[in-house]
Image (tube, rainbow, N blue to C red):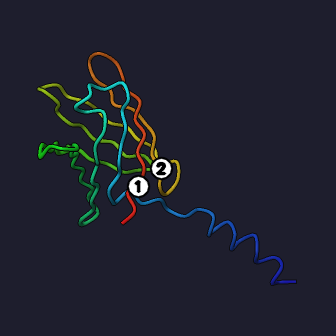
Amino acid sequence: MLTLLSFPAINAQTSKVRKDPAGDWKYEALYAPSEYSTGVIKITVAEKKYSAVITFPGSEYKITGENVKYENDSLTFSIYVEGEMVSVVMKMDDASVMTGKALYSMGEVPLTAKRVEK
């Protein structure tokens, strides 16, 4: 009887697996200018602090994220693109997909990102 009663408690603990954004994420922002519409967001964590760097295909240009935070399955950071601040807000849908948006003075651009498997 005790064994049967312990299954729901075990299931409740295992179903709440923490999603970790650390890794490489290939993103698409279909409505962004073409040079920024695809790329890779590299998210690292050191001493419980996250960092983000965006790279673009065919270019050595990199943008470093500022004020990177990860809380409640949401990743937020700011970047400067051509002198304008862009706020990025993404939510982990599961361990391999994030969705969100980039907010800037002209509005917002939807984003999707998929984890790059190594």
Distance from Cα at disc 2 to Cα at disc 1: 6 Å
Query: At numbered mark 1, what does the secondary structure look like: helix, strand or loop?
Result: strand
Identity of the amino acid at label 1? Arg
Query: Which one is in front, 92 or 71?
Result: 92
**69 versus 109 height, above or below:** below
Q: Circles 2 and 1: CB distance less than 8 Å?
A: yes
Query: Which one is in front, 14 or 82?
Result: 82
Q: How many marks?
A: 2
Where is mark 1, residue-wise? Answer: 115
**Residue located at (21% from left, 46% from top):** 55
**46 versus 41 height, above or below:** below
Residue 43: percent from the left, percent from the top? 29, 55
Where is mark 2, residue-wise? Answer: 97
Left or right of residue 56, residue 94 in this image? right
**Residue located at (76% from left, 75% from top):** 7
Quarter of the picture holding the N terminus = bottom right
